[in-house]
Amino acid sequence: GAHRSCSSALRASGMISDLLKTLLWSGFSPKEAAEHAGCTTRYAREIAKNEGISRATSNGDQPSREQLDAMVEEVVRDCGHDYGRKMLLGALRARYPRYTFSRSSLQESMTRVFPQAANARRYWTRRRLMRDHYSAPHFMYSMHLDLNGKLQEYGLFVGAAVDGDSRMVLRLHVLTNKLAATVYTQVFLPAVEQYGLPDQTLTDKGSEMLVISFVCHHLQMLTGLFGFVARQAHRFIPSTRNVRVEKFNGEINVRVIKPFKLLLMYMEEVGFLDIADSLQLGVIQLLGRPLLQFACDQLSAAWAEHYVSNKAGNGGIPVQRMLQRPHPGHQLQIPHDYDGVQNYEQHSGRQLDRDPEWAAARDPLVQDTQAQLHREAGACCRPHL
């Protein structure tokens, strides 16, 4: 009560209002000025309104239109045209501290002084921020395939194939290498055997996708459709455009890879694991692969039944969209007797690797040639049961 009466007396004498004016003109907000003066924020706002003080005009004078254009031209001559409005505003404040610059007047000045540079920045920003609209009219119109390598230092990879329209996970499989033959036989082939060949397969430009690309085009040629359909059977695209599977990679990272990688990092930290030892790495692959595959299976099942939202209004539950928007017909199927790896080797004239280079180092007899020969001889002479 005593504090309130004292504050009222000071307000009546005009001391608080004078202090508030000084603080507000110095750039303090009404709330900050009220805290310093010991009054309410409401009273500080009344003083600011009566005096015509705003945060924009309290720090300094605003330059005229001609002054601002000259300042902008000088700063841009020194800093270049890559400075957008925010960066240029900072440069102006640093060079002319006694002036206040509004964002709208600065944007207008930039357009007046350097119109071509302003249009170029506007065009680049629009291209960067506005994503292309994704369109797929039916199931298996496009299949997006990628390899997640977040565990590659442990010799483990997760291959994913996602349908473009329904976003159904067609294949989610854990691999112990990323050889082209492995990715084809363990990721691509099971997916197309179950769901049929997509109208177009999209992958990044990694060498592990070469067999997949060859098989897609080869089957299109064998069916006589090559050159008679508008879309190529396979396309190499940058990862930034392979949006369907790249977005799903975030789910793999969080729900499959993260817990397992945290465990492996802890084992390395306490000295239980040395990834430089190929035998230890082999054990991690042997024990870790089924655990990761179980997590992948759980993720695929949950993903198929959950609602996927979309700003374009074409969201839905993947398994339901797959059934509601099926392929219209004449979908290519992979022949049962077709060997994609063998056909690739015949047409390319080179033999594909089946085992990675480091596989031999995991053999416990790698340094003992005699023991290896003895083992091979025993295997040859062992009767088949």
Image (cartoon, rainbow, N blue to C red):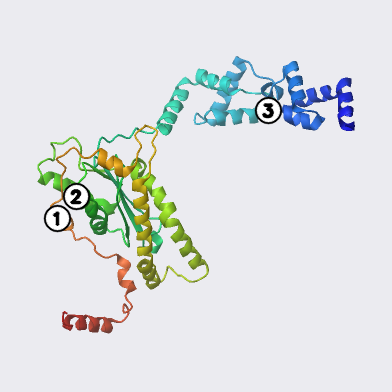
Does residue 78 show up? no
Residue 202, which numbered label?
none
Query: Which three-letter amino acid code belongs to the residue tagged 1?
Result: Asn
* Image spot of residue 309 (x, y percent): 39, 38
Residues at discs 1 and 3 in contact (Cβ within 8 Å): no
At mark 2, the secondary structure is helix
Residue 97, which numbered label?
3
At mark 1, the secondary structure is helix
* Image spot of residue 285 (x, y percent): 36, 66
Residue 374, image quadrant: bottom left
Residue 214, which numbered label?
2
Alpha-carbon span between mark 1 and mark 3:
72 Å
Please name the residue shown 77% across and 20% down the image.
47
Alpha-carbon span between mark 2 and mark 1:
9 Å
Mark 2, mark 3: which one is toward the viewer? 2
Residues at discs 2 and 1 in contact (Cβ within 8 Å): yes
> Is 219 left or right of 264, judged from the image as shown?
left
**Residue that mark 1 sits on:** 343
Please name the residue shown 26% across and 84% down the image.
370
Q: Residues within 10 Å of mark 2 (few under 14, many from 20)?
A: some
Query: Which three-letter amino acid code belongs to the residue tagged 3?
Result: Pro
Mark 1, mark 3: which one is toward the viewer? 1
Query: Which three-letter amino acid code belongs to the residue tagged 2?
Result: Phe
Please report whichever mark, 1 or 3, sits nearer to the chain's N-terminal start. Answer: 3
Q: Nearer the viewer, residue 324 or 39?
A: 324
Q: Residues within 10 Å of mark 1 (few under 14, many from 20)?
A: some
